[in-house]
Amino acid sequence: MNFTQPDFAPAYAEIFLLVMVCVVLLADLAWGEKKSSIAYLLAQISLLGCMFITFATSAPGVVYTFSGMFVDDAMADILKMLVYITVSTVLVYSRNYISLRGMLSGEFFGLALFATLGMMVMISASHFLTLYLGLELLSLSLYAMVALRRTVGATEAAIKFFVLGALASGFLLYGMSMIYGSTGSLDIPRIVEVIQTGSINHPVLVVGLVFIVAGISFKLSAAPFHMWVPDVYEGAPTAVVLFVGSAPKLAAFGFVMRLLAEGLGGMAADWQGMLIILAVISMVIGNLAAIAQTNIKRMLAYSTISHMGFMLLGIIGADGNGYSAAMFYVVVYVLMTLGTFGMIILLSREGFEAEKLDDFKGLNRRNPWYAFIMLLLMFSMAGIPPTVGIYAKLSVLQAVLSVGYVWLAVVAVLLSLIGVFYYLRIVKLMYFDEPETDAVILPQPDVKILLSANGLAMLGFGLFPQALIALCAYAIQQSM
């Protein structure tokens, strides 16, 4: 029996991270009581090491390994680098918050790194089983993170997240099984070949596609599969919500690209109609429901739903231009989410959660600099020039118009105008209302620098968006 040694080089970063997760947990067990920051430092070192390995092993072209189940290309490398940066930023923002709430432990950082590993596997998957394994590793880690602080709200949110997540996983598995029954393979390149030949049972394939799109919609938090999002955002600790709402969206985009754009690209005419419905419903529900919220985390949950609807507009283009526009939108959305939840964490303190819109009243009088940072973030969320949010929206609208969906672009613009209201409402509270507290805002130096850079990036990328747009276009062109 001959055994061919696989090429481990494309997966060095994943292997390194898996080893480091074990190191983090063992180090916390041995020295965690004496030095509570040991797990945090090792987690940051792990992400830095992954970044170096991914950069060192990146190469032009597409490389397959593990019998074609794992792929290394430009899109995978760039998305992974963005995931490392995002998770590292989340840990910096969250450190003081979780320390004050008794969550600064190896469990939090171990779960965060396991979730990161799941994202990396999803991004580099070239087989349905690899996609599913990465997705479940990410999902199970997120379920545990949501329930890590054993409050009633967090426990309830975790149960809802778990039950609905299991249902979505069942949809995905059933859809994959029907595609396997129709094509005879779970390997993405092989599925592409079979679909191109036309010798398939098309009705069965379409039914499988419906279930897959439903499962993807849950992971993207797109309506009408959005039921878990507001409850999880409201019930989970803010540090966990920051993690759930940022890096996994990059992995979800990679998941969509591998599954729909690459594997089922030959069926674009079938899944475009489904995504149009999902996009419109997401933008309608997200924007209208957000107006009625008084809890800022719940408002941002509905905002996420509308943003994911907007991102789907790029995927609907079903070409390189549309995919790069969608990737650009996701990257910008993650940057905005990091900064916004970073501000919520900044205003929270021991025994107090800055979860209400009223908690932002008079922020300009308490600290003009952070009010300005929040203003930039809200302007970008709303798509107001000169922030980068306007370019993110314009790029996906251009992709939609290029394939002839003029009515869809008009609907998206009208619905985004509704969204401007609830973002500007926060700006109004910060600059025109009296503060409800005079508590001093004293962030850690690293948080102060990083949060300021995060907010200013909204303005910087808005004035000079070409580099980020070119990076996304390069990732898609080299991988398609």
Image: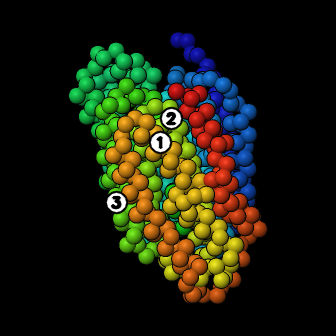
Neighbours of disc 1 within 10 Å: few (<14), some (14-19), many (20+): many
- Mark on residue 285? 3
Q: Please report contact status of discs 2 and 3: CB closer than 8 Å, yes or no.
A: no
- Relative to 320, is 5 above or below? above
Neighbours of disc 2 within 10 Å: few (<14), some (14-19), many (20+): many
Residue 397 on image: x %, y %:
45, 45
Query: The residue under label 2 is which amino acid type?
Result: Asn
- Relative to 23, is 447 above or below? below
**Mark 1 or 2: the one toward you:** 1
Query: The residue under label 3 is which amino acid type?
Result: Ile
**Pointer 1 residue:** 398
Query: The residue under label 1 is which amino acid type?
Result: Gln
Distance between the alpha carbons at the discs numbered 1 and 2: 9 Å
Q: Is residue 270 in view from this perspective?
A: yes
Q: In the depicted view, which residue is nearer to us: 352 or 460? A: 460
Q: Secondary structure at mark 2?
A: helix
Q: Please report contact status of discs 1 and 2: CB closer than 8 Å, yes or no.
A: yes
Residue 433 on image: x %, y %:
55, 84
Residue shown at 58% from the left, 58% from the top = 385
Residue 50 on image: x %, y %:
69, 42
Q: Earlier in the sequence, mark 1 or mark 3?
A: 3
- Mark on residue 321? 2
